[in-house]
Image: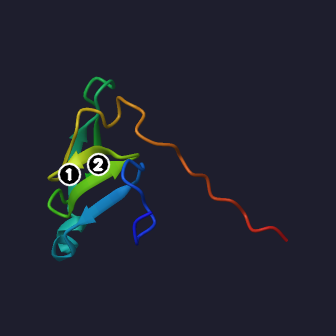
Amino acid sequence: MTPVGFDPGDRADLVVLRPEELNASLDDIHEQPMAGFDELKRLVRRNEKAVQLVVIGGRIAVRDGKPESALGTTKLGTLLRASLPRS
């Protein structure tokens, strides 16, 4: 095991952000067409410069702020559900 607790070949989730891009531009609203809904547009707040890389289950989902083709079409990971504290 490596000093950070992972072995080569382990699957991991990772997000690489550019903190300097987490600024007021995140408040800007853009229209984004939704595939599969006759290009119906939805409102989004997005700064593609802020998120450089997203890795889900060891597979790249976003690179250089742009979604990869697997995102939304291929199962990349497993949803981890929050648990309530036991009383």
Residue drawn 33% across and 26% down?
Answer: 37
Find out whether the residues at labels 1 and 2 contact each other: C-beta distance under 8 Å.
yes
- Would you identify the image quadrant in which residue 60 lies? top left
Return the residue nearer the eye: 65 or 54: 54
Image quarter where the N terminus lies is bottom left
Percent across and percent down for residue 78 are 51, 43
Q: Image check: 85 left or right of 46?
A: right
Residue drawn 40% across and 39% down?
Answer: 76
Image quarter where the C terminus lies is bottom right
Residue at image mark 2: 43
Q: Say which element carries label 1.
A: strand
Q: Which mark is residue 30?
A: 1
Q: Which mark is residue 84?
A: none
Q: From what the image shows, is residue 7 above or below residue 71?
A: below
Q: Is residue 21 visible?
A: yes
Return the residue nearer the eye: 30 or 14: 14
Q: From what the image shows, is residue 55 above or below residue 70?
A: below
Q: CA distance from mark 1 to mark 2?
A: 6 Å
Residue drawn 26% across and 63% down?
Answer: 16
Q: From what the image shows, is residue 58 above or below residue 72?
A: below
Q: From what the image shows, is residue 69 above or below residue 54?
A: above
Which amino acid type corresponds to the residue marked 1 in the rendered image? His
